[in-house]
Amino acid sequence: MAHSKLVRDLVAAIGAGAVKAEPVDLTLFSKDAGVTRGEVRAVTFPVDAAGVSAVVKVAKRHGVPVVARGAGTGLSGGAVPADPSVLVVTMRMNSIEVDADNGAAWVGPGVVNLDLSRHTAPLGLYFAPDPSSQAACTIGGNVANNSGGPHCLAEGNTSVHILGVEFVDADGVVQVVGGLAPDMNGLDVRGVMVGSEGTLGIITRVLVRLSPIHPAVRTMLFAFSDVASAAATVSDVIAAGVVPAALEMLDRPLIRAVENFVHAGLPVDAAAMLLAEVTGHPAGIAAEADLIVATAERHGAFDTRVAADQAERDLLWKARKSAFGAIAQIAPDYYLHDTVIPRTRLVEVLEAIYEIARRHELLVLNTIHAGDGNLHPKFAYDGSDPDQVRRVKAAADEVVRVSLAAGGALSGEHGIGLEKRDLMGLSFSAVDLDAQARLREAFDPDKRFNPGAMLPAGSRCFDFGRVSMGSPLDQVSTRPGVGT
Ligand SMILES: Cc1cc2nc3c(=O)[nH]c(=O)nc-3n(C[C@H](O)[C@H](O)[C@H](O)COP(=O)(O)OP(=O)(O)OC[C@H]3O[C@@H](n4cnc5c(N)ncnc54)[C@H](O)[C@@H]3O)c2cc1C
């Protein structure tokens, strides 16, 4: 097919093999793993910062926005263009240069999270943030969303593990911020880049901190006959001064769905289960594990299982990380929410979520990063039924409001993207939004990078009146073409 001048200029800049613009490509890359879809004008696959710079310059000449994309596993529509855009897909930027002496590595943004740890394992090192999507998601996406994961309770979210960032700015110039020095002088621009969701520049290399692989690990599963006892165990363990490497909760509907899918011997009669893990030196973790077991049993855990070996440990984690696949047995679509609340409000907010689901006649299944209060209710539904879509939208909206009323935040780890952009006014004052918009303008005065993401229209003080309060699912239509 005859291509536009934009596509021909992109081909001239980075080569025909690095540009795709056939209708099938534009459709394929028009959504991420969430529920929104956008319009793509061309998909580019640069191999280095020079290629990214060339794409940014061509797009600038044509007045077209640029949206960065890693693996497209994001759930908030962050890599989905709000306006017709050129995509920069980073999958071919996957170099890894390890600096073992400094416990660090410069890596391409397209390196898959798990591949990095596999690469460094022979050196006794790993990259600690472990999103459940780690077999697919990229380091660039992790940085842009400041992603979390089950083991980020003790290790900290991605931000803690990022020492420096190389990025292409709005003029196509390559910049480097941060570095190996333990305390960089001046403003922490590295910190600003982490979590910026592709709105400040395109990340072309990341200096990551690598952590020593823990010499010992113990993984435990506890079954409870009510959610409150599981939540009380979580609070008491942390109050006792133990921060486990991971402390995850699954509720009954999800336990049953996962067990049916993975056959890991999960306690299908439990109302809730906890998956707890401690890591460190053998002597230290034995004491911590004993304390966790005693706390769970004091709160009535009726089944306690300590993984006997690596194979059993892997099976339990496979079960935890298979929640998404398991739901596919139940309904063709699910809407996964991501809010975070104070840990102490867990039981009350969870009860409110069950009540919301009941009232809207929806099935809700919950995985919870219980240690840090990060909720992931998943509403199972059929996207071809407009009535179900309407009910899921209403329920999702209520979950946000209940979480915020409990002192929580809009997103624990998945980012704001397009999904929650129009809810930012619920969480931030007009002054806060204006400050964020000004910062963004300082990097990208022409709003070239991911212009529709994260900040709602009207964030600048001059047009406060235009901030809209939409539902997280406002962009969802009925299938075909939507759903995850
Ligand atoms: C099954 C499943 C489980 C998940 N579990 C978790 C979890 O446990 N924890 C968690 O935090 N998230 C989780 N996620 C969400 C998602 O995997 C993460 O947000 C992940 O970090 C996204 O990486 P990605 O490479 O797919 O990024 P994409 O989806 O491609 O992009 C995400 C955002 O990053 C920006 N971006 C990507 N690359 C760059 C770059 N080079 N420069 C600038 N901006 C860039 C994009 O513009 C977009 O805003 C899960 C998703 C799925 C589908």
Image (spheres, rainbow, N blue to C red):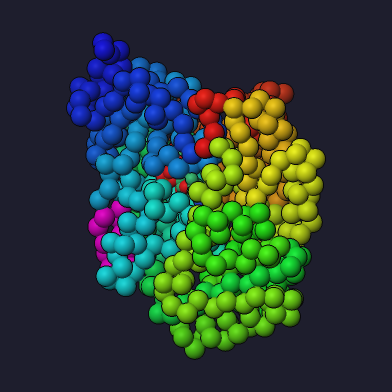
Depth check, front residue: 315 or 276: 315
> In this orientation, does residue 191 appear?
no
On the image, the x and y values in percent for residue 189 come to 45, 48
> In this orientation, does residue 319 appear?
yes
Query: Does 123 appear above or below 466?
Result: below
Drawn side of residue 236 relative to residue 3, left or right: right
- Identify which residue is drawn at 58% across, 82% down: 288
On the image, the x and y values in percent for residue 435 come to 61, 38
Drawn side of residue 55 relative to residue 432, left or right: left
- Identify which residue is drawn at 55% across, 26% down: 479
Q: Residue furthest bottom?
A: 283
Q: Residue furthest top?
A: 2
On the image, the x and y values in percent for residue 350 come to 74, 54
Depth check, front residue: 102 or 40: 40
On the image, the x and y values in percent for residue 40 come to 41, 23
Drawn side of residue 171 relative to residue 238, left or right: left
Query: Does 115 appear above or below 62?
Result: below
Q: Specify whether residue 288 is painted magenta.
A: no
Q: What type of secondary structure mainly makes up the magenta span?
A: strand
- Identify which residue is drawn at 68% across, 35% down: 392
Residue 429 appears in which quarter of the rendering? top right
Count of marks placed on residues: 0
- Identify which residue is drawn at 37% across, 57% down: 114
* Magenta-drawn segment: 96-107
Depth check, front residue: 168 or 152: 152
Quadrant occupied by the N terminus? top left
